Image (cartoon, helix red, strand yellow):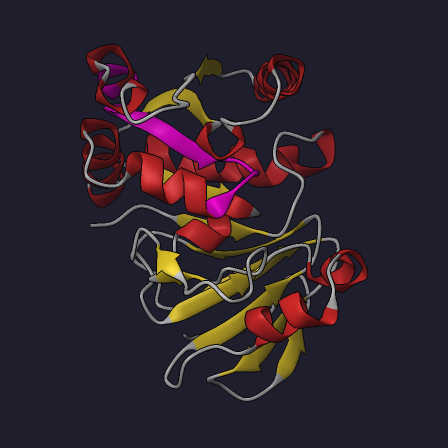
Amino acid sequence: MSGSIALVGSGEFLPIMSEFEKSLIDDGVKNNKAPTYIQIPTAAGQESEDRLKYWENLGKSQAEILNVEPHFLPIYTKEDAHNPEFVNKIKNSALMYMSGGDPHYLANTLIDTPVWQAIQENWITGASLAGCSAGAMAMCGEIPNFRFTKSPPTPGFNLLPNLRVIPHFDKFFRWIPDSAAKVLLSAPEGTTLIGIDELTALVKRTNQHEWFVQGEAQVHILQGAPKQQLLHGDQIKL
């Protein structure tokens, strides 16, 4: 029994996303997990101390709204991902949330570590797992290298091997050059390519076969299934 899994375009820990995040915690609690909220800021591990503190405080504020216990785990290096204290915090938590930053750094730092093993085991036994922006991209089999367009994709966590996610879809292509956009939009054959707008999520709940859209904007199916735009409440089987 795997727990709920959520791919979020943007907006982790913002008040507007609190109802959605509470639903993920509730899913975990229904599966006998403890009502704790794990923040995994690894994707931002190369950013400034001020930026990392911003994420920590944002998550604490959200936890107060949700009335749950938060745990901000400063997992910034491969060494950190071997820390047994962090592993123990992850075990039996209702929601584990990987936030934004660099998806390549996130996956490379956590893959083949005790922290990643704990995340997988907790999710498989009923906890909710969410990834926002970089966190959503890293859930897939490969992460396209849109910053260095001549470099090949790097391995993701491979929880969703046949998916590729473009977060911030309604804003992304304003920020990046055409060469980077081409990399993002050129997914391998057999891959379902999905664009997720900001403040919007695609979520599959425990024991459900369909994915549901929740949030302010749209999810865009771009390749691998009939092209379409999905709104809050719409569902799709992937």
Which residue in the rendered view is the most extreme toward the bottom?
226
**Residue 132 in sight here:** no
Does the stretch in magenta take in 94? yes
Residue drawn 73% across the image and 36% down it: 16
Left or right: residue 143 compared with residue 155: right
State the image coordinates of residue 119 (x, y, percent, origin top left). Answer: 27, 35
Q: Residue at x 59, y 41 (%)?
A: 20
Residue at coordinates 42% horizontally, 75% vertically from top-left?
237
The magenta-colored residue range is: 87-103
Residue 49 percent coordinates (x, y): 60, 13
Q: Nearer the viewer, residue 114 or 215?
A: 114
Q: Residue at x 66, y 13 (%)?
A: 50
User: Does 147 appear above or below 177?
Assistant: above
Q: Residue reaching furthest front? A: 150
Residue at far right of view? 174
Residue 172 shows in this picture: yes
Residue 28, magenta (yes or no) = no
Q: Nearer the viewer, residue 214 or 72?
A: 72
Quadrant containing the C terminus is: bottom left
Q: Quadrant of residue 111?
A: top left
- Give coordinates of residue 192: x percent, y percent: 45, 77
Tell how many labels: 0
**Which x, y percent locates residue 142?**
37, 62
Q: Nearer the viewer, residue 227 or 110?
A: 110
Is 24 situated above or below 81? below
